[in-house]
Each structure stands twice: as structure tokens, then as C-alpha cells.
Image: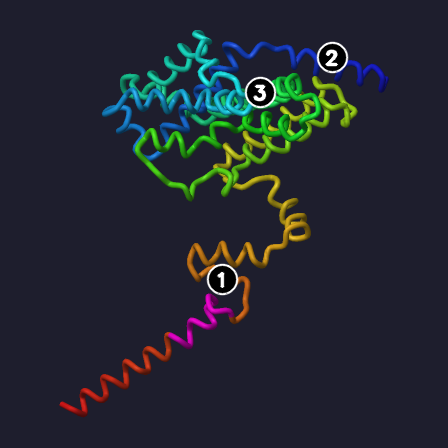
Amino acid sequence: MELLSALSLGELALSFSRVPLFPVFDLSYFIVSILYLKYEPGAVELSRRHPMASWLCAMLHCFGSYILADLLLGEPLIDYFSNNSSILLATAVWYLIFFCPLDLFYKCVCFLPVKLIFVAMKEVVRVRKIAVGIHHAHHHYHHGWFVMIATGWVKGSGVALMSNVEQLLRGVWKPETNEILHMSFPTKASLYGAILFTLQQTRWLPVSKASLIFIFTMFMVSCKVFLTATHSHSSPFDVLEGYICPVLFGTAWGGNHHHDNHGGSHGGSHGGGGPGSPHSALPARSKEELSEGSRKKKTKKAD
């Protein structure tokens, strides 16, 4: 009985890995990607004033991962734009989301139950892109583990990693929003997924690629749908990282540096009497107030 269940699971994973992505899953990927573009401040005004710039931003949201992967592997950056069907489909989605009368298309795809379906289908595309990126990099660099991991990572989260380039097209420059400095859940998950698929590709992970695609897709779909439904920006990896990172990297210097850059009100959690802590700031303020009060008294006496 266990053998039959294992065979059925293996067949299910194999059938799932062979499901074509175009056009249904790619359509969902384009819809969610361009929705996130419309959420950006000033994106609607940009589409009215500079529609060409808005279209380029939309294409980066849809195909940025392919551009970064081609850059890493030394292939033509514009190679994927020869896929006319995908470009036309993404362009149609961009036009409907930004210019549909009465915003009917935008309102339909933003309806939460419908949006959750699109989000789930987008994660199917993300995991498949990571697996394909690892396989492609392995074809060029058989023993280049780091090349395979980097290629799979940018395939899964290239849009987020190119966020500063996309911002420049919109006339915005915010280097502090760099995705590497503030990794979101999809970016972290793409990195961890790239490591898993690299281990599988180099035969260090004893599992079939179809099974790994199926398992990791189920993980990504369940996490992303839950985070979207609850409007949460947290990450399922936060608890694990909270235990591992202090052991491997420490948090004293990095934590103080981070809080110093974001105001002194957060520094109280670290304690201490350093020059940037609130304990040293309070006496300084009290001395200034005392000196100011004494000056007022002197002027009153002089008057």
C-alpha cells in the first residue's frame, strides 16, 4: 500500500512538472506582477504622462528575471523579447490594468478571492523558473555551484532585485530600498530554493526534480497565499533566522548600526550607555534645559 501511494505521488509530481505554463500560468504571473507596479506611488500618473516609460516598467516587472539571468550567463539581454506571444500578452495585461474603462479589469483582478488564485499560479511559475535557471546554468558550468545558485536566484526574484532600475525609469531614486538590504519573503525563498535545486542538480539531494518542484511549489503557494490573504509582510523564515543568525553572524554591531540609522528611539532595546543610546541623551538634554533656565533667570535679574 505504501508503495502504491509513493508511486501515485511520484506520478502526480511528474504530471505536475509537465503542465505547460503558457498561456494560463504566464497570464497570472503577468497580472500579479503588473498589479504590484500599479500599487507603486505615482505609477498611475506615470502611465498617463509617459505611457512608454510605464510600459517599460511593466516589461521589467514581467521579464526582469530573464534579463538578469542572461546578464549573468553572458547571453543577449534582449533575447527573451523575441518571444512575441509573451510580450503581446504582457502588453495586453498592462493596458487593461492601467487603461481599462472604469478600471473594471483592475477591480476584477484585485477582488481578493480572484487575486489569491492568481498569486498561487504565479508561485507555480516562480518555482519552475528557478528549476529551469539551475538547469540552464548547469549546462554552461557543470561544477559552478555558485553560478547555478545565482542564476536560479535571479530567475526566481529578478524583478525585486532590479527594483532600483525600475524606479529609475519612473524617475525615482531610493537606494535605501535595495532588495538585498531588505529581502522580502519571495527573494529569500528563491535563494533557498535555488540552493535546493542546485543540490538536486548536482545529485547531492536524493530526490527527483519533479518531486522537488512539486513540494517546493506547494510550500511557496501556501505561504504566499496566506501572506496575501492576511496582508502580512512577515516571512516564515523569521523565526528560524532569529535563532541561526545570532549564532553565525552575531547581532550586536549590526543591530546597533541599523537602529542608529533609523532613529534613537529603537536603541533602547539594546541597552548600554554608548554615545548613541537614550541613557546618554537624557542627561545632555537636561543640562541644556538647566543652562537655558539659568540664562533666563540671569536676564530677568538684569532687567
Lateral position of residue 248 relative to residue 303, left or right: right
Q: Which mark is residue 166?
A: none
Dot placed on the residue nearer the N-terminal end, 2 or 1 = 2
Label 1 element class? helix
Say what amino acid the circle numbered 1 marks: Gly
**Count of numbered circles on the image:** 3
Position of 57 relative to 91 (above/below) = below
Q: Which mark is residue 267?
A: 1
Q: Hey, which residue is sitting farthest front in the picture?
A: 74
Secondary structure that dominates the magenta span:
helix
Q: Which residues are magenta?
A: 274-284
**261 or 223, which is in the foreground?**
261
Question: How many neighbours does mark 1 have within 10 angstroms: few (below 14), some (14-19), or many (20 or more)?
Answer: many
Say what amino acid the circle numbered 3 marks: Lys
Q: Which mark is residue 129?
A: 3
Tell me the quarter of the image containing the C terminus. Answer: bottom left
- Marks 2/1: CA–CA distance: 54 Å
Q: Position of residue 112 (x, y in %)?
A: 45, 27
Q: Which mark is residue 11?
A: 2
- Marks 2/3: CA–CA distance: 21 Å
Q: Position of residue 104 (x, y in %)?
A: 33, 19
Q: Position of residue 129 (x, y in %)?
A: 57, 20
Label 2 element class? helix
Snapshot quadrant of residue 204? top right
Lateral position of residue 286 relative to residue 226, left or right: left
Is residue 265 on the magenta stretch? no
Say what amino acid the circle numbered 2 marks: Glu
Position of 253 relative to 50 (above/below) = below
Is residue 281 on the magenta stretch? yes
Dot placed on the residue nearer the N-terminal end, 2 or 3 = 2
Snapshot quadrant of residue 294? bottom left
